Image (cartoon, rainbow, N blue to C red):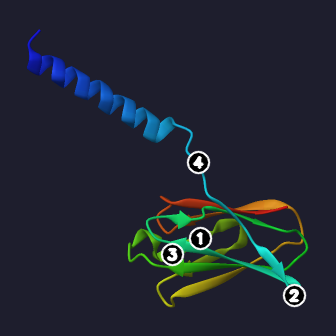
């Protein structure tokens, strides 16, 4: 086996390992918690190459709002969709878009970008 073949084999193995880690590896997820102030709770999600944090925790029984702070002009991220709530908001109309989240019962509300490529969730506990 020549040195170029060995190098090619090593690069291929490293690339396969990276692809497996990227798609199947356990990635740490940022979780945000809303602060309760004056009988309501509000939190921010920055929209830039995805959602940060991608998971928000709200307290049950306290009116909740999630603010999407648009910092990315990607067409995919221009909309946020909460299918369970019937919400499809255009995030490009204003810098920060606020969405009211029902907190009357415990549950998880998943949201995605307009193309379904980026995901997040709001958990009511």
Is disc 4 surrounded by few (<14), some (14 to 19) or many (20+) residues within 10 Å?
Answer: few
Q: Nearer the viewer, mark 3 or mark 2?
A: 2
Task: Kindly indicate whether the residue at mark 1 contacts the one at mark 3 (C-beta within 8 angstroms).
Answer: yes
As drawn, the residue found furthest toward the top would be 1
As drawn, the residue found furthest toward the bottom would be 94
Q: Earlier in the sequence, mark 3 or mark 2?
A: 2
Is disc 1 surrounded by few (<14), some (14 to 19) or many (20+) residues within 10 Å?
Answer: some
Please give the residue where the numbered disc 2 appears in the rendered image.
38
Task: Kindly indicate whether the residue at mark 4 contacts the one at mark 1 (C-beta within 8 angstroms).
Answer: no
Q: At 38% across and 29% down in the image, what residue appears?
A: 17
Cα distance, mark 1 to mark 4? 23 Å
Please give the residue where the numbered disc 1 appears in the rendered image.
81
What element does badge 1 sit on?
strand
Please give the residue where the numbered disc 3 appears in the rendered image.
79
Is disc 2 surrounded by few (<14), some (14 to 19) or many (20+) residues within 10 Å?
Answer: few
Q: Nearer the viewer, mark 1 or mark 4?
A: 4
Task: Kindly indicate whether the residue at mark 4 contacts the one at mark 2 (C-beta within 8 angstroms).
Answer: no
Q: Decide if residue 102 is on the left or right side of residue 105.
A: left
Q: Earlier in the sequence, mark 1 or mark 4?
A: 4
What element does badge 4 sit on?
loop
Q: Earlier in the sequence, mark 2 or mark 4?
A: 4
Q: Earlier in the sequence, mark 3 or mark 4?
A: 4
Cα distance, mark 3 to mark 1? 7 Å
Task: Kindly indicate whether the residue at mark 4 contacts the one at mark 3 (C-beta within 8 angstroms).
Answer: no
Q: At 47% across and 58% down in the image, what residue appears?
A: 117
- Find residue 116 and report its horizontal and vertical position in percent: 51, 60
Please give the residue where the numbered disc 4 appears in the rendered image.
28
């Amino acid at each position: 086996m020549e040195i170029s073949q060995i190098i090619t084999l090593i690069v291929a193995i490293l690339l396969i390992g990276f692809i497996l880690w990227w798609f199947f590896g356990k990635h740490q997820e940022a979780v945000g918690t809303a602060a309760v102030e004056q009988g309501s709770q509000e939190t921010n999600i920055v929209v830039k190459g995805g959602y940060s944090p991608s998971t928000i925790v709200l307290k049950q029984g306290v009116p909740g709002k999630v603010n999407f702070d648009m910092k990315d002009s990607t067409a995919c991220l221009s909309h946020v969709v909460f299918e369970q709530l019937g919400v499809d908001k255009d995030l490009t109309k204003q810098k920060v878009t606020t969405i009211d989240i029902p907190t009357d019962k415990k549950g998880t509300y998943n949201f995605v970008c307009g193309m379904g490529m980026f995901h997040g969730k709001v958990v009511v506990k």
